[in-house]
Image (cartoon, grey):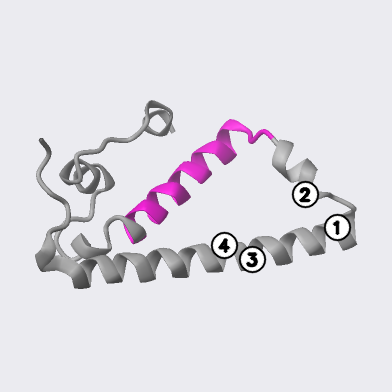
Amino acid sequence: MAKPYLTEHNVDDLGRMLLALLSEVWIMRDRMAITEELLLQKAGISSAEIDDYLPSPELAAKLGALRERFVMNVVGAPLSGVERDVDTILARAGLRRPAAAEAS
């Protein structure tokens, strides 16, 4: 069995993780709603077109880097002072990146 990521001794860490996640999600949702509204008003691009868009390899790489930062901010919140590598943080939690994420 993997080493426990959180125990009863780090409830504060769990709270920091939750607040980091809530902050990240709200910022993204707020920006996405504004972006979609501006795109609809100025360019006529709908939410459905955004949902169906397939990124180029360059954009996929950029999204991979953004995903890494997101994982670091959320999953790594309790460990950010000690461990700074996403793979190390995921390993401590008994997880690993999906194969598609490793390629990007």
Query: Which numbered disc, 2 or 1, marks the residue that appears first in the sequence?
Result: 1
Gap between marks 4 and 1, in whole Å? 18 Å
Which quadrant of the structure image shows residue 8?
bottom left
Question: Which amino acid, mark 3?
Answer: Arg
For disc 3, the neighbor class at 10 Å (few under 14, some 14 to 19, many from 20) is few
Q: Are marks 2 and 4 in contact (CB under 8 Å)?
A: no
Gap between marks 1 and 3, in whole Å? 14 Å
Gap between marks 2 and 4, in whole Å? 15 Å
Residue depicted at x 22% and y 55%: 84
Q: The magenta stretch spans which residues?
A: 54-73
Query: Which numbered disc, 2 or 3, marks the residue that appears first in the sequence?
Result: 3
Which quadrant of the structure image shows residue 6?
bottom left
Gap between marks 2 and 1, in whole Å? 8 Å
For disc 2, the neighbor class at 10 Å (few under 14, some 14 to 19, many from 20) is some
Q: Secondary structure at mark 1?
A: helix
- The residue labelled by disc 4 is 28
Kindly identify which numbered label has been placed on residue 1: none
Of residue 79 and residue 85, the one placed in the foreground of this image is 79
Instruction: Please state, as top left, top right, bottom left or bottom right, where the C terminus lies in the image.
Output: top left
Of residue 33 and residue 85, the one placed in the foreground of this image is 33
Looking at the image, residue 87 lies above or below residue 54: below
Q: Are marks 4 and 1 in contact (CB under 8 Å)?
A: no
Query: Which numbered disc, 1 or 3, marks the residue that appears first in the sequence?
Result: 3
Question: Which amino acid, mark 4?
Answer: Met
Q: Position of residue 70 (x, y in %)?
A: 41, 55
Kindly identify which numbered label has been placed on residue 31: 3
- The residue labelled by disc 1 is 40
- The residue labelled by disc 2 is 47
Residue depicted at x 46% and y 70%: 23
Q: Secondary structure at mark 3?
A: helix
Which quadrant of the structure image shows residue 94?
top left
